[in-house]
Image: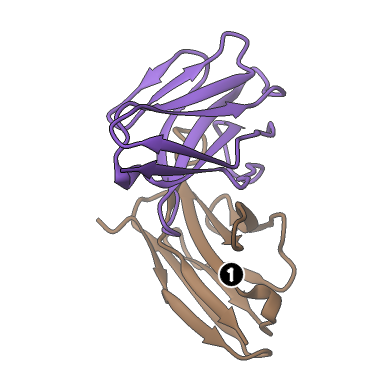
């Protein structure tokens, strides 16, 4: 039982390159989230998905796109990476409407040079 | 969801109780207080939550004031492994889309 799995764990991109961060959960939760965390800061919500087939913008969606591929998987895409997107990215899941304890992945540390 | 305020940092001697305060003066009646911690840039980990009664589990105790405007997370016997950033959030038990994770309290447990 892995919980929430993020890949890759580390990535270095050049400015303008694209990449997709993957998140998969085996908890059968409906809701999934993508956050970014900059040094010394809290977590800021980028996008979330309340259920399979739906996605909504969070606090800082610019420069990102998401796909809720199925109930298990929620991916985050950077189409043209910028140095300002250097951050640690966390995926999380919750069971909507019930005990909404959030479960987080271990993070993807992204550096854009 | 209600905004919360926490001290930026705290120290605690190993073996002593760590008492982490949180202010949530604008909390509404249907919002719960949740605590998470983040150890060394790992993903945040759930600790405990409560509505108005005090709560205890194997990790910690949560004391919520009668007016619900503040709460205290208590780690009864802090160890070096409790060194982490602790986040207090207040939200309704539905979705995390409006939850604000502020900078939290950086707790250092000192030998």
Q: Position of residue B57 (x, y in %)?
A: 31, 26
User: Residue at 62% across / 55% down in the picture?
Assistant: A41
Q: Secondary structure at mark 1?
A: strand
Q: Residue at x 41, y 74 (%)?
A: A9
Q: Measured from the top left, where is residue B64 in percent x and y?
A: 52, 17
Find residue B9 and report its image quarter: top right
- Up the image or down, A69 lies above or below B103; here it is below
Q: Note whether B29 is above or below B24 in the view shown.
A: above
Query: Is A37 on the left-hand or right-hand side of B56?
Result: right
> Disc 1 sits on a residue from what chain?
A
Q: Quadrant of residue B67?
A: top right
Q: Residue at 44% across / 78% down in the picture?
A: A10
| In the foreground, B79 or A30 | B79
Between B15 and B69, the residue placed more toward the observer is B15
* Residue B80 relative to residue A38: left or right: left
Residue under circle 1?
A: A87
Furthest residue in direction left, as rendered: A1
Which quarter shows the C terminus of chain A? bottom right
x then y, percent, for residue A8: 42, 76
Residue found at the far top of this picture: B66
Work out which quarter of the rendered image holds the N terminus of chain A and state it: bottom left
The chain coloured purple is: B
Residue at 60% x, 15% y is: B68
What color does chain A have in the rendering? brown
Image position, residue B85 (x, y; %): 48, 46
């Amino acid at each position: 039982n892995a919980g929430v799995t993020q890949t890759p764990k580390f990535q270095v991109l050049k400015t303008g390159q694209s990449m997709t961060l993957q998140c998969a959960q085996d908890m059968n939760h409906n809701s999934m989230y993508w956050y970014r965390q900059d040094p010394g800061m809290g977590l800021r919500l980028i996008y979330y998905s309340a259920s399979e087939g739906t996605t909504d913008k969070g606090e800082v969606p610019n420069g990102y796109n998401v796909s809720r591929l199925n109930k298990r998987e929620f991916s985050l895409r950077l189409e043209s990476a910028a140095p300002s997107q250097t951050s640690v990215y966390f995926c999380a899941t919750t069971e909507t409407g019930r005990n909404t304890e959030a479960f987080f992945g271990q993070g993807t540390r992204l550096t854009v040079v | 969801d209600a905004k919360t305020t926490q001290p930026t940092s705290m120290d605690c001697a190993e073996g002593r109780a760590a008492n982490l305060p949180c202010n949530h003066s604008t909390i509404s009646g249907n919002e719960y207080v949740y605590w998470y911690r983040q150890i060394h840039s790992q993903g945040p980990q759930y600790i405990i939550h409560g509505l108005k009664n005090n709560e205890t589990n194997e990790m910690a105790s949560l004391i919520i004031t009668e007016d619900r405007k503040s709460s205290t997370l208590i780690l009864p016997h802090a160890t070096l492994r409790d060194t982490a950033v602790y986040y207090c959030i207040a939200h309704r038990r539905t979705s995390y889309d409006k939850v604000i994770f502020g900078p939290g309290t950086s707790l250092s447990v000192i030998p």
